[in-house]
Image (cartoon, rainbow, N blue to C red):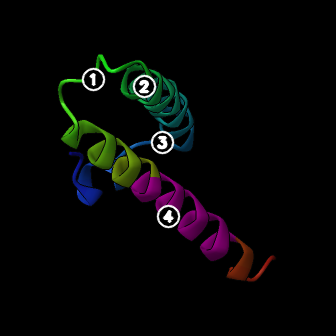
Amino acid sequence: MTKIADIRAKTPDELQTQLLDLRKEQFNLRFQRATGQLEATGRIKAVRRDIARIKFVLHERKRSAASQPKA
């Protein structure tokens, strides 16, 4: 599980890369669950929450950039 402080320390490009990796892992975990090969069932929940954390930080940054007055 990734801490929110670690996520906030990363650049948007790093977050996009990590988000892509987590979505691939989520797909593989769902595939393993469907075929009955999944052993670490708790990993699905952890990956889903990590994806949500990254998306939250990206949206938070986008929102704060939009509210900044432009010079």
Q: Answer above or below: position of 25 versus 5.
A: above
- Secondary structure under badge 1? loop
In space, the residues marked 4 and 1 are separated at their CA atoms by 28 Å
Q: Amino acid at mark 3?
A: Thr
Q: For the point 45% across and 48% down, which residue is it?
A: 51
Magenta segment main secondary structure: helix
In space, the residues marked 3 and 4 are separated at their CA atoms by 14 Å
Q: For the point 56% across and 36% down, which residue is it?
A: 16
Q: Are marks 2 and 1 in contact (CB under 8 Å)?
A: no
- Secondary structure under badge 4? helix
Residue 42 x/y as whole percent:
20, 42
Q: Amino acid at mark 2?
A: Glu
Residue 25's disc number: 2
Foreground of the two, 44 or 36: 36
Marks 4 and 1, the one that precedes in the sequence: 1
Residue 61 x/y as whole percent:
57, 65
| Residue 62 is inside the magenta segment | yes
Q: Amino acid at mark 1?
A: Leu
Quadrant (top left/top right/bottom left/bottom right) for the C terminus: bottom right
Q: Are marks 4 and 1 in contact (CB under 8 Å)?
A: no
Based on the displayed image, in which of its 4 quarters is residue 30 positioned? top left
Give the labeled residue for mark 3. 11
Marks 2 and 4, the one that precedes in the sequence: 2
Q: Answer above or below: position of 71 versus 41.
A: below
Q: Rate crowding at label 1 as few (under 14), some (14 to 19) or many (20 or more) other CA atoms within 10 Å.
A: some
| Residue 1 is inside the magenta segment | no
Range of residues picked out in magenta = 52-65
Residue 56's disc number: 4
Give the labeled residue for mark 1. 38
Q: Is residue 51 left or right of residue 59?
A: left
- Secondary structure under badge 2? helix
